[in-house]
Image (tube, rainbow, N blue to C red):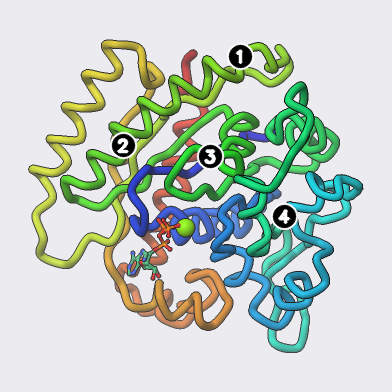
Amino acid sequence: MARKIAFINYKGGVGKTSLLVNIAACLAKLGKRVLICDFDTQSNASIWLLRLDRWNKINTSSQGAVYSIFDPGEAKVSDLVVKDVVRSKTGEVVLPGLDILPTTFNLVDLENEFRGDPARPPYVIFRDQLEAIESNYDFILFDCPPNILRASQCGIFSANEIYVPSNPDALSLIGFTLLVEKLGKFHQLSASFRKSSQGVPARVQGIIFNSIKTGVDIDVPRMRMQLRMNQYRSAKRVAPSAKLFEQHVRDAMVVRRAVTLGLPVNLVNASADSSGESTVVDDYRKVAMELIRHGDGITD
Ligand SMILES: Nc1ncnc2c1ncn2[C@@H]1O[C@H](COP(=O)(O)OP(=O)(O)OP(=O)(O)O)[C@@H](O)[C@H]1O
Ligand SMILES: [Mg+2]
C-alpha cells in the first residue's frame, strides 16, 4: 500500500516544495514508485519538473491540470498523471518512477469560484479518484501551500502522514503551531466523509529542518521545536511516533539552481558526488532514508 504523505507548514517559503521534490527524486533513485500531487496554485513543483515549455502547454490548454477533475469535472486523475516526468532536454526519461499530477494557476478558482455539491467536497472527489491509481505507487506525496484551504485539503484528507519542513526560526515554530490547530479543525469537519479503507487521518509525524547555513548552531531552535512537539505529543495532537528528524538539509546554491535547470538536485550534482565530499544531495538522501525508516515505526 502506498504511503500517502503531505508536506505542509503554515509558514511560507520554508522549503516545502524543494524538500518534497528532492526527497521524491531520492526515493525514485532507490527504485521506489513515486507520485507527486501538486496542490499549490503557484505550481512551483509542476513548473520545476515539467519545465516551462511542457507546463505552458498545459496552462494554456486548460486541460491536463488537476483543477479539471473539479471543473468541468470530466477529467480523471489517472489520465492527468505525467509519467516519468523528469526528462532530458531531448525528452529522454532520466529518472524512471517519478510521476506528477500537475497543477496550473487555475487551481486558485477552487477556493472561490467553484460551486460544487456540498455533499461531495473537492477532497472527496479527489480521494475517490486517487484510489484508482494508489496501488501503482510506493509513495504519494502532496505538495501543499501554507494553508488548509480547499486545494490543500485534498492532499491532507488523502494523506496518512504529515511532515513539516521548517527553518530554524520563530516563524516556523508559529507555522507549526498554527498547522496543528487548523488540522484538528479540518479533521473534525471532514470526519463524516472518511472511509475506513483510508486509514488514519493524517497527523504530524515529523519536522525536518531545512536551509541550515554552515556554522549556524541550531541547538536552540531544535530544542524549542522539540519542546512544542513534546507538548503536542502529550496532548495527542500529533502522532505518538512524531519526531524531529535527525538529519537536516543544509543551505546550498545548487538547490536554487536545480529549479532553473528543471532537475532535482540529485541529477544536477552527479559529478560532485564522486569527490568524497558530503553535499546537499547526501542530506536529501539521508532525509529520504530516515523517512523510509520512520514508516516502519509509525504507531497510531
Ligand atoms: N536547502 C536550501 N538551500 C538553498 N535554497 C533553498 C533550500 N531550500 C529551499 N531553498 C530555496 O528557498 C526558496 C523557497 O523554497 P520552497 O519554494 O521550496 O519553499 P516553500 O515552503 O515550498 O514555499 P511556498 O510556501 O511559497 O510554497 C526557493 O527559492 C528555494 O529554491
Ligand atoms: Mg511550495
In terms of image quadrants, where is residue 225? top left
Q: Residue at x 22, y 21 (%)?
A: 230
Which element is circle 2 on? helix
Judging by the rendered image, the residue that carries numbered circle 4 is 101
Q: Which residue is drawn at 66% across and 55% down?
A: 107
Which element is circle 3 on? loop
Specify few, some or many for label 1: CA neighbours under 10 Å numbering under 14, 14-19, or 20 or more: few
Judging by the rendered image, the residue that carries numbered circle 1 is 191
In terms of image quadrants, where is residue 276? bottom left
The three-letter amino acid code for the residue at tag 2 is Phe
Specify few, some or many for label 3: CA neighbours under 10 Å numbering under 14, 14-19, or 20 or more: some
**Measured Cα–Cα span from mark 4 to mark 2:** 26 Å
The three-letter amino acid code for the residue at tag 3 is Leu
Which of the two discs, 3 and 4, labels the residue nearer the N terminus?
4
Judging by the rendered image, the residue that carries numbered circle 3 is 149
Q: Residue at x 28, y 61 (%)?
A: 211
In the displayed structure, 160 sits above or below 271; it is above
Which of the two discs, 4 and 1, labels the residue nearer the N terminus?
4
**Measured Cα–Cα span from mark 1 to mark 3:** 16 Å
Q: Is residue 263 left or right of residue 13?
A: right
Residue 36 seen in the figure? no
Which of the two discs, 2 and 1, labels the residue nearer the N terminus?
2
